[in-house]
Image (cartoon, helix red, strand yellow):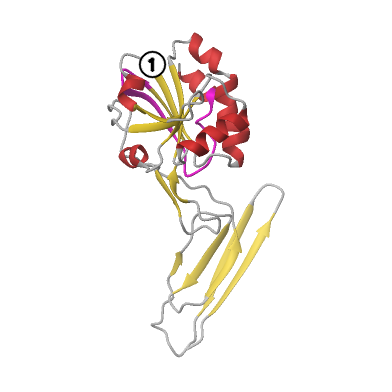
């Protein structure tokens, strides 16, 4: 049985419309071909009938995305052990999240990976340049967390020319990232990044989350130093 589907699109300077018509054979008056939108995340919108014939048409539509995590504003940050390389001794040392946050106003922000473009060119440098302003507003600790080992984080620190403006901390096993529920699974990507962390920025006071700016994956829209300054 054949079903024909035609699509026409009318454009004007002020509006656009898409018309869809379905012609059904006269021999099958009871045949129906309900249509369903099968993809909703791009300017290309796919339409297909239950007969598995599909077409693609251009359309413009806005959608909302719900970003979830295991942590929320008002929650206590889970304790975890992070590591870093002591530049004076080249020894790997550890620090706990609780020691970074207890009795302090702390900003912890995360990046998907050391040496990656947005992280190296925008995210971390932004916090380095705004560190003075953030501390003038009462911030005691500014720490960047990534699922990289301590040696990579130290090499990255040197490459960026960071002194003590921002701590670069390793969550090498993804323990803290997992407790927050912000894993970013990149194992299916050609570059083989494995499981990393989504980008976020957290403001905690005495370990309690006051601001949580969580990005979708590695996007960079609301977790910058400027965003945190506005929240203080």
**In terms of secondary structure, where does tag 1 sit?**
strand
**Is residue 126 rendered magenta in the image?**
no
Q: Out of 21 and 103, give the one closest to the viewer.
A: 103
* Residue 79 percent coordinates (x, y): 28, 30
Residue at figure coordinates x 45%, y 25% from the top left: 143
Furthest toward the right, the residue is: 13
Seen in the image, is 214 located left or right of residue 103?
A: right
Seen in the image, is 199 located left or right of residue 79?
A: right
- The residue carrying mark 1 is 105
Residue at figure coordinates x 51%, y 77% from the top left: 53
* Placement of the C terminus among the 4 image quadrants: top left
Magenta span covers which residues? 204-225
Mark 1 Cα within 10 Å, few/some/many (few <14, many 20+)? Answer: many
Q: Out of 130 and 173, give the one closest to the viewer.
A: 173
- Above or below, 144 against 174 in this view is above
* Residue 154 percent coordinates (x, y): 52, 32
């Amino acid at each position: 049985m054949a079903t024909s589907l035609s699509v026409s699109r009318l454009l004007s300077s002020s509006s656009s419309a898409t018309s869809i018509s379905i012609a059904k054979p006269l021999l099958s008056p009871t045949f129906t071909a309900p249509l369903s939108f099968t993809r909703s995340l791009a300017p290309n919108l796919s339409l297909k009938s239950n007969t598995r014939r599909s077409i693609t048409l251009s359309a413009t539509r806005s959608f909302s995305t719900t970003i979830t995590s295991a942590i929320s504003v008002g929650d206590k940050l889970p304790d975890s052990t992070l590591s870093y390389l002591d530049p004076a001794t080249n020894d790997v040392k550890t620090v706990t999240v609780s020691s970074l946050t207890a009795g302090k106003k702390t900003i912890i922000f995360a990046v998907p990976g050391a040496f990656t473009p947005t992280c190296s060119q925008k995210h971390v440098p932004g916090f380095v340049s705004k560190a003075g302003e953030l501390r003038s507003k009462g911030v005691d600790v500014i720490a960047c967390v990534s699922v990289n080992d301590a040696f990579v984080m130290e090499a990255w620190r040197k490459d960026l020319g960071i002194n003590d403006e921002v701590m670069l901390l390793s969550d090498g096993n993804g323990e803290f990232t997992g407790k927050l529920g912000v894993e970013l699974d990149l194992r299916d990507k050609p570059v083989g990044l494995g499981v990393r962390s989504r980008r976020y920025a957290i403001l905690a006071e005495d370990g309690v989350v006051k601001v949580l700016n969580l990005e979708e994956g590695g996007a960079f829209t609301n977790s910058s130093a400027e965003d945190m300054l506005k929240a203080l």
